[in-house]
Image: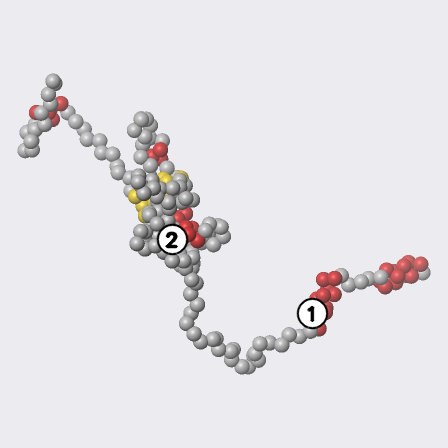
Amino acid sequence: MSALIRSTALTSRRVLPPASRAFASKAKTTATPAHQPSEPPPASKAGPPVVAAEPPTDSTTSSYSPSHSVIPEEHIPSTVIPAGVVSGAPMDLQSRTVRIYKPTKNAMQSSNFRGKTWRMDWDVLGKGHRWENPLMGWQSSADFVQGTHLSFRSKEEAIYFAEKQGYEYFVQEPKEREIVSKAYANNFTWSPNKLKKIHTK
């Protein structure tokens, strides 16, 4: 008998949580639709399409035009997952061109370690967007990607990264070194061109 009284007392104390109470109150109110389902939807407002305003560009000194209304997915292939939307990079990078190349070997060293990776960097901005010394022509480092470069293990990885970020790119192929076998007898072969005279003094 005491257990029955205790269970009834516990059930009488139950109170709906705030979330369920809010849901129950919302379920009672019915929102009126914008238009009846049997009627066609209202026509859109007539007029020219809205185009985002862009800042003026100094076309006389530079061809660089930062576009603030470019959608990064427009020039991304369908096979590439776009990442420029969530990368947090400024929209000015969408108008910049990147260069994919292979660094040359250092002339002061015999090893070819620098020639194993591919590098991607941004082209330097021309006149009109950076301060320039009128006497010597030195330009300031106001460009935030002037000294920025990325390294990749292969050319395909660099191209895939540029397409994924929505960058316009061009590939600069490296010049292959041609090693020609030489012999001492080649010094005495006939040549139709003018001979090179080597003097000891």
Q: Is residue 50 above or below residue 86?
A: below
Residue 35's disc is: none
Residue 26's disc is: 1
Res 156 visible: no
**Is 155 displayed left or right of 84 in the figure?**
left
The local crowd at label 2, few if under 14, some if 14 to 19, many if 20 or more residues have their Cα within 10 Å, is some
Viewer-side residue, 95 vs 114: 95
| Residue at the limit of the structure toward the top, as seen here | 201
**Is 28 displayed left or right of 161 in the figure?**
right
Q: CA distance from mark 1 to mark 2?
A: 49 Å
Label 1 or label 2, whichever comes before in sequence order: 1
Quarter of the rendering occupied by the C terminus: top left
Quarter of the rendering occupied by the N terminus: bottom right
Q: Residue at x 36, y 31 (%)?
A: 113
Q: Which residue is mark 2?
A: 95
- Number of callouts: 2
| Residue at the limit of the structure toward the bottom, as seen here | 39
- Quadrant in the rendering for residue 14: bottom right
Res 186 visible: yes
